[in-house]
Amino acid sequence: MTWEYFISMEHLTELGIAIGIFLLFLLFRKLFTKYVFAILLRLTRKTRINVLSNVLLAFEKPVQWLFIIIGLYVSFKYYGINIGYNTNLPIIGKIMKVSIVILFTWGLFKLSSSSSTLFRKINEKTDIKIDEILIPLLSKTLQFIIVAISLTIILQEFGYNIEGFIAGLGLGGLAISLAAKDALANFLGGIVIISEKPFTIGDWVLTPSVEGTVEDITFRSTKIRTFADALVAVPNAQLANEPITNWSKMGKRQITFNLALTYETPKETIQNIVQRIEALLKDNPDIDQETIFVKFDKYSESSLDIFLYFFTKTTVWGEYLEIKEDINFKILDIVHDEGAEFARPSRR
């Protein structure tokens, strides 16, 4: 092609039409996002099928970019650039095919990140029960598989020998295994946690390392939100070898303490206080009635001690504190009504 052709009216017209086609696809992209996608999303939400909504939301951005790729393809075809392998510009065809693979991978990756919803729906609708702690691992495993398959397709598209690449990984397997020893130990620790199920997502746990609420478990670590609102990542290998107290598995919550009265308190007064506190606990609907102990327990150095041991029905921290406070106030009233006094640490 000569310079005269490039500046000719015929060429400029073809170039303008090609650019116009691309701009038209950009307009289609905007119309699809503003109207078509919004209508489809509204319809799927009315059907109450969350899977369809998740698919639409996951592929929203990839479909928008797909309009750009299709617009470029049509524009090139009209302009006279034959996109393929038997042309002077085979790289353009490869880039477009790879772009479509990347967009499809992007959508599947986003969909798998919301797959926790899908797994929970499976739990609700079928007899297949998936533990909460397993859901993040399944989601991340699915994402890894999607990326690995897409990367394989892209490498093959550019002519890389995947078999040779895998063989190379086999030759370096020893070095990789030595370098990844800790990672493997953490992964196996995660398997132990999943199989033994000492806790699940949302449980309140106590270990020698940390205390808080379990937020997530990954291949390497378990993330625990402390009560100071800090996020702590504990390696799975370490967590699997530590004693774990799961406070969320409590069916009831313990309250126990000693009520210290002065040595001047008469026997009859102590008996009345014990009986009234015991009646108070047995009449309280928030107290578990299976185990209630209110006993004159021992002679301390400066007090006569009444031992209290009982449980609240709730295990929720805030509700537990409210019940405990209410009982403490009522015990205070009982002691004052009986004319007794609380002992102070002293010696005679």
Image (cartoon, grey):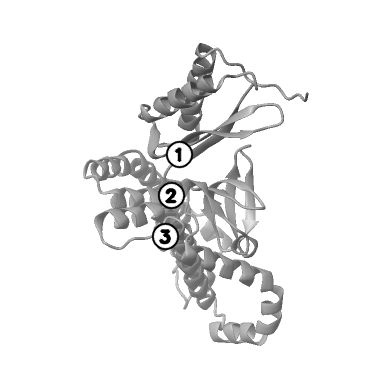
Of badges 1 and 2, nearer the viewer stands 1
C-alpha gap between disc 2 and disc 3: 12 Å
Q: Nearer the viewer, residue 93 or 320?
A: 320
Percent of width and height locating residue 322: 48, 26
Task: Of the two numbered discs 3 and 1 on the same chain, state the one appearing first in sequence.
Answer: 3
Residue under label 2: 61
Q: Residue at x 68, y 78 (%)?
A: 176
To which residue does mark 3 refer? Answer: 108
Graded by Cα atoms within 10 Å as few (under 14), some (14 to 19) or many (20 or more), the crowding at tag 1 reads some
The residues tagged by marks 3 and 1 sit, at their Cα atoms, a distance apart of 40 Å
Q: Nearer the viewer, residue 173 or 304?
A: 304
Of circles 3 and 1, the one toward us is: 1
Give the amino acid type for the residue marked by disc 3 in the picture.
Leu
Tell me the residue at 60%/19% (across/down): 265
Label 1 near label 3: C-beta < 8 Å?
no
Please state if 254 lies on the left or on the right of 57 as rendered: right
Is 180 rendered above or below residue 130? below
- Can I make out residue 96 in this image? no
Foreground of the two, 122 or 93 = 122
How many marks the image carries: the answer is: 3
Quarter of the image where one finds residue 122 = bottom left
Residue 289 shows in the view: yes
Task: Measure the alpha-carbon separation of dots 1 and 2.
Answer: 44 Å
Amino acid type of the residue tagged 1 in the rendering: Thr
- Which residue is labeled 1 in the image? 315
**Which numbered mark, 2 or 3, is in the foreground of this view?**
3
